[in-house]
Amino acid sequence: MPSTAPSFHQAPARRSVLGRAAAVLATGALLLGGAAAPALATPASPGAAVKYHFDQDHAGSTVAAHEGRGGAPALQPLVTQTRGQDVSSWQGSVNWSAQASAGSRFAYVKATEGTGYTNPSFAQQYNGSYNAGLIRGAYHFALPNNSSGATQANYFVGHGGGWSADGKTLPPALDIEYNPYGATCYGLSQSSMVSWIRDFSNTVHSRTGRYPVIYTTTDWWTTCTGNNGGFGTTNPLWIARYSSSVGTLPNGWSYQTIWQYADSGTLAGDQNYFNGAYDRVQALANG
C-alpha cells in the first residue's frame, strides 16, 4: 500500500471525427430482449483443435493469473471517480436495480468473442442496466489469431456492439488481453498485433462513428504491441490493474478513462472507476 494516495487526471470528453452522425444501433433481438444468437461450438482457428470456454472469458479473466492482485485502491483523487462494473455470461441474470442502489452508474457488458460466440445473457444485462438508469456499453473479447480485426469488428457491431447518441450508450469496447487458449500474444508479432487492433478500431469507427475504448493491461500492451503509442489520441483507455493505484499506463495515454481495479467486490462482476464525475461519463456516451 503506498504511503501517499495516487494522483488522478480527469478524462476529458472525447468527440469522434464523425460525431453523432453515424450512430448505429445494435441489431435484432439482442437489444429488443429476444434470444441471443446461438454460440458455435468453436470458431475457425488455425492448427490443432482448441477446447473453447467462451462463457469463462471476460474482461480481466486472464489478468490475475498473469499479474496477481494487490491492495484495494487508496482513493483520494484529484477528481471525482464514478463507480461502475463490467459483466458477462459468467454473472447470468443481474439484479440491476440492486446494482444502481449499490452505487453503480455505468456498466460494460460482454457481447461477443471471436466470430462464433454471443453472450446468452446479453439482452438481460444490456437492456436491464439501461432500464435501471445506468449508462451502458458493449465489449468484444478479441481472438486475434482466429480472424481479421475487421471481421471480428463487423461481427461485434452486428451482434450488440453498436452505439446510439442517446446519452445512455458508451462507445463499443475492445477487450484485448492475455490469450486464454495459448501463446500470450496469440502467435502474432508486435507489428501484426498493432495492425490487427487498428483494423478492428477503424472498422468499428466506420460502422458506428465511434472509436472503440481499448481494454488492456500495461504489461500485455508492452509485450504484444511493443508498447505502441499510436492509439492514445483516438481510443479511450480502459486499464486493468488489481492494485492500489493504476500504475504506469501504456505508451500514448496520459490518463486512463476507466480503471478496472478488482475482479470482485460489492457490485456484480468486475469493479471499475470512471476517471471523472458522472457528467464525464455522460460526455463520453454523447460522443
Image (spheres, rainbow, N blue to C red):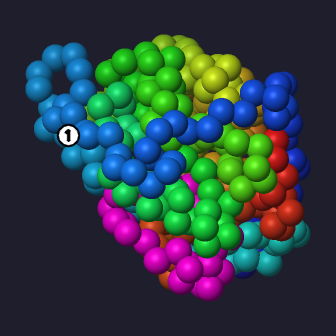
Identify the element where label 1 is drawn: loop
The answer to whether residue 175 is seen in the rendering is no
Instruction: Identify the residue shown where x is 16% and y is 17%.
Output: 47
Q: Eyeballing the image, is 286 above or below 100?
A: above
Q: How many marks?
A: 1
Residue 108: percent from left, percent from top = 56, 55
Q: Is residue 91 left or right of residue 99?
A: left
Q: Residue at x 62, y 57 (%)?
A: 136
Front in this rendered view, residue 134 or 231: 134
Q: Which is more toward the observer, 87 or 121?
A: 121
Three-letter code for the amino acid on which mark 1 is drawn: Tyr
Residue position marked by numbered label 1 in the rendering? 52
168 vs 17: above or below:
below
- Whether 231 is among the magenta residues is no
Q: Quarter-wise, where is residue 214 in the image?
A: top right
The span shown in magenta is 87-110
Residue drawn at x 88%, y 69% is 78
In the rendered image of this protein, does residue 125 appear above or below residue 187? below
Where, quadrant-wise, is the N terminus in this rendering? Answer: bottom right
Q: Is residue 104 magenta?
A: yes
Q: In the drawing, does residue 275 fall left or right of residue 215?
A: right
Q: Is residue 181 above or below residue 46?
A: below
Q: Position of residue 148 (x, y in %)?
A: 43, 16
Q: Decide if residue 269 is on the left or right side of residue 79.
A: left
Quarter of the image for the C terminus: give it: top right
Give the camera-side residue of 26 and 177.
Answer: 26
Residues packed near mark 1 inside 10 Å, few (<14), some (14 to 19) or many (20 plus)? few
Q: Which residue is drawn at the image coordinates 30% and 31% (left, top)?
A: 116
- Specify whether residue 98 is in view: yes
> Which residue is nearer to you in this view: 142 or 42?
42
Pinpoint residue 179: horizontal percent, then vertical percent: 34, 37
